[in-house]
Image (cartoon, helix red, strand yellow):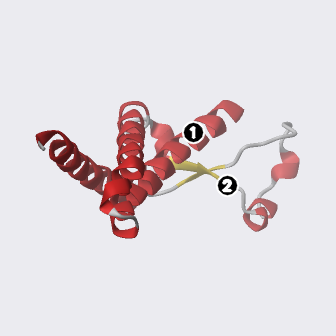
Amino acid sequence: FDETACWITVGNCLHKTTVLAGTAYLFTPLALPLDYSHYISLPAGVLSLACCTLYSISWQFDPCCKYQVEYDAYKLSRLPLHTLTSSTPVVLVRKDDLHRKRLHNTIALAALVYCVKKIYELYAV
């Protein structure tokens, strides 16, 4: 089960990286001068798209993406974990990931559109 927990953690990391890098990519031009913003925003956009692509290929249809590892001590204390033979049990909880995937895909799509626009502007001049 430790491998399952690691697999879920890597999927969560890819999701969060997609969302955070995509958000940074979309808002960097608002915070920095336009002459310098593409040095930060374009790599962030490429990172967001790469993570989204990897997540979509490897995790999107994997049944593990429907589960999260439970770390809440209060919830874990209510389970009969003392009856288990394993000294390090991993508790998985089924979660609805529809809103998470919508956010993930919307930000990645917005980053893709904006990235294509910026690359076109850089090379069209």
Residue 5 higher or lower than 68, as above or below: above
- Name the quadrant of the N terminus: top right
Q: Secondary structure at mark 2?
A: loop
Residue density around tag 2, few if under 14, some if 14–19, many if 20 or more, within 10 Å: some
Residue at (78, 42) in percent of width and height: 89
The number of callouts visible is 2
- In the displayed structure, does residue 71 sit left or right of residue 84? left
Q: Secondary structure at mark 1?
A: helix
Res. 98 visible in picture? no
Label 1 to label 2, Cα distance in Å?
Answer: 15 Å
- Name the quadrant of the C terminus: top left
Q: Answer with mark 1 or mark 2, whichever residue precedes in sequence.
A: 1
Q: Amino acid at mark 1?
A: Val
Indicate which label's residue lies in the foreground, 1 or 2: 1
Callouts 1 and 2 close, C-beta under 8 Å:
no
Task: State the image coordinates of residue 117 (x, y, percent, origin top left).
Answer: 17, 49
Task: State the image coordinates of residue 39 (x, y, percent, origin top left).
Answer: 39, 48
Residue 18 higher or lower than 102, as above or below: above
- In the displayed structure, does residue 34 sit left or right of residue 23? left
The residue identified by callout 1 is 10
- In the displayed structure, does residue 124 sit left or right of residue 78? left
Task: State the image coordinates of residue 54 (x, y, percent, origin top left).
Answer: 40, 33
- In the displayed structure, does residue 110 sit left or right of residue 65? left
Q: Amino acid at mark 2?
A: Glu
Residue at (40, 43) in percent of width and height: 43
The residue identified by callout 2 is 70
Task: State the image coordinates of residue 71 (x, y, percent, origin top left).
Answer: 72, 56
Near-viewer residue (96 or 25)? 25
Near-viewer residue (109 or 31)? 31
